[in-house]
């Protein structure tokens, strides 16, 4: 739900005309996006709005741990406060109380606030019997090199917007209101692309390897999307109906190694054309890949180890997920390699038959796995949305 466009369309796409002509841009903005990205997205609803929102330019992901002794009553009060902060900031309004005026006169900037809980939260509150099966810890995958301190957590908040100031304003308010009951466990930030810079506000964004990233996703607003992502109205447990599960992976890209590949090798690793995103079997970005098509020389056009072949639902018992990553680029590590990559965010109603099924195959067979490292991980229940007068988490905490 888009509530309204808050500002001019005057700057629409001004930065991208030449590239657009080269790459065949779409001319019209699709539903749910304005050309300058300053729209207001509806906070209240069956699902939290940050899951399906158009790609945003900036995002912060913060995990919190409860302070020892925190009670369910205290958590309920925090969730009510977080709900009112989310509702106000997403509407571009000042906070209900104690606004620091950081983003005075700015917003809403397509701001979304998304809140989830980890299994450890339920354990700490004595609600261990209500932990969904879907929050069973992820298995260890081949090649995992995970930093436990940068992984998991009791609560997670994703704040994303087309303006960094607008996003941080909301995040700081949430951190301040949490201070007495929950402290930061880890925080990362990353970026997508800005609506006015992409060839159209609904175009597929690129990642730091330069690939169009998101082509194969289920499309928001379709029945296939809802089936993939949300716990249905008759699903279990009841407190998760309308919610979803988030798998977070901090995936470093070995960018210097990747850059040494030529364009053809890079395209073979993914199975898609870099400029257009079309599958190497031919067509345009959204043409279905033909995994059985051979070159005149007898080679599979979409190579056996290519990422899209290995990740495809066909090879993974129908496994589908909705990917919504943020890029990060944080200078160089002590070993000289770029600290860069993806904050990979995948939503699905069942992580075991979604992310886990796919990653078990990718970790062993994907050419791309040579060029990436999984360094942190998280599994969270993303709470159902709420209606006016209600609050996030009410289905769990009532
Ligand atoms: C597709 C990049 C990690 C699952 C793609 C595509 C690219 C890409 C460029 C093709 C376009 C698209 O459909 O979006 C990357 C990069 C990764 C990464 C750079 C790490 C840095 C992962 C992981 C998973 C995954 C960890 C899941 C475990 C998928 C799926 C598809 C896909 C399901 C769609 C396949 C299809 O079209 O059937 N990825 N990916 N990716 N990726 Fe990844």
Image (cartoon, rainbow, N blue to C red):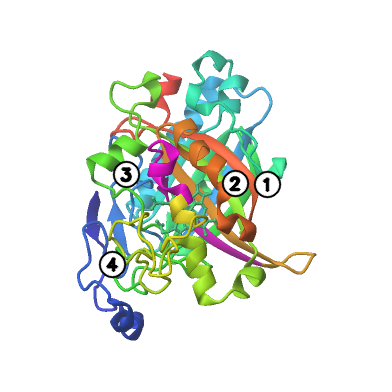
How dense is the environment of label 4, judged by Cα within 10 Å: few (below 14), some, or many (20 and up)? some
Please say if the residues under marks 4 and 1 sit with CB atoms less than 8 Å apart. no
Specify the segment rendered in magenta: 310-330
The residue positioned 38% from the left and 70% from the top of the image is 296
How far apart are the alpha carbons under marks 2 and 3? 37 Å
Left or right of residue 208, residue 6 in this image:
left
Among the two numbered marks 2 and 3 on one chain, the one whose residue lies closer to the N terminus = 3
- Give the residue at mark 4: 283
**In the rendered image of this protein, does residue 31 appear above or below residue 320?**
below
Please say if the residues under marks 2 and 1 sit with CB atoms less than 8 Å apart. yes
**Residue 179 in sight from this viewpoint:** no
Percent coordinates x, y for residue 343 in the rendering: 55, 53
Is residue 327 a member of the stretch shown in magenta? yes
Is residue 337 a member of the stretch shown in magenta? no
Among the two numbered marks 2 and 4 on one chain, the one whose residue lies closer to the N terminus = 4
Q: Secondary structure at mark 2?
A: helix
**In the rendered image of this protein, does residue 253 appear above or below residue 138?**
below
Disc sitting over residue 43 in the figure: 3
How far apart are the alpha carbons under marks 3 and 4? 38 Å
How dense is the environment of label 3, judged by Cα within 10 Å: few (below 14), some, or many (20 and up)? many
The residue positioned 39% from the left and 22% from the top of the image is 239
Tell me where residue 32 sits by quadrant: bottom left
Residue placed most toward the observer, 263 or 324: 263
- Give the residue at mark 1: 143
Q: Secondary structure at mark 1?
A: loop
Among the two numbered marks 2 and 1 on one chain, the one whose residue lies closer to the N terminus = 1
């Amino acid at each position: 739900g888009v509530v309204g466009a808050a500002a001019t369309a005057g700057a629409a796409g001004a930065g991208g005309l030449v590239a657009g002509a080269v790459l065949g841009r779409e001319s019209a903005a699709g539903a749910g996006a304005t050309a300058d990205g300053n729209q207001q997205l509806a906070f209240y609803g069956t699902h939290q709005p940050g899951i399906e929102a158009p790609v945003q330019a900036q995002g912060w992901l913060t995990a919190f741990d409860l302070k020892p002794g925190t009670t369910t009553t205290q958590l309920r009060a925090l969730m009510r406060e977080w709900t009112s902060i989310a509702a106000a900031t997403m509407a571009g309004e000042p906070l209900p109380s104690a606004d620091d005026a950081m983003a005075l006169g700015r917003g809403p900037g397509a701001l979304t606030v998304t809140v989830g809980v980890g299994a450890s939260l339920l354990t700490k509150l004595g609600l261990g019997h209500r932990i969904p099966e879907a929050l069973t810890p992820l298995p260890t995958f081949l090649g995992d090199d995970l930093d436990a301190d940068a992984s998991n957590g009791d609560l997670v908040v994703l704040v994303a917007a087309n303006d960094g100031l607008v996003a941080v304003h909301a995040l700081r308010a949430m951190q301040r209101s949490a201070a007495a009951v929950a402290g930061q466990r880890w925080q990362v930030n990353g970026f997508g692309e800005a609506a006015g810079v992409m060839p159209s506000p609904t175009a597929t964004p690129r990642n730091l390897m330069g690939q169009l990233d998101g082509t194969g996703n289920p499309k928001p607003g379709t029945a296939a999307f809802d089936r993939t992502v949300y716990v249905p109205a008759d699903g279990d447990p009841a407190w998760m109906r309308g919610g979803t599960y988030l798998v977070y992976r901090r995936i470093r890209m070995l960018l210097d190694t990747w850059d040494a590949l030529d364009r053809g090798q890079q395209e073979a690793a993914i199975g898609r054309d870099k400029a257009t995103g079309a599958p190497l079997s031919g067509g345009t970005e959204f043409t279905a890949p033909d995994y059985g098509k051979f070159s005149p020389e007898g080679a599979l056009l979409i190579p056996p180890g290519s990422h899209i072949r290995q990740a495809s639902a066909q090879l993974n018992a129908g496994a589908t997920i909705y990917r919504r990553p943020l890029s990060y680029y944080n200078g160089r590590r002590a070993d000289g390699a770029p600290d860069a990559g993806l904050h990979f965010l995948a939503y699905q109603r069942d992580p075991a038959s979604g992310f886990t099924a796919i990653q078990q195959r990718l970790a062993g067979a994907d050419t791309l796995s040579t060029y990436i490292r999984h360094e942190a991980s998280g599994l969270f229940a993303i709470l159902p949305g709420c209606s006016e007068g209600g609050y996030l988490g009410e289905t769990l905490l009532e």
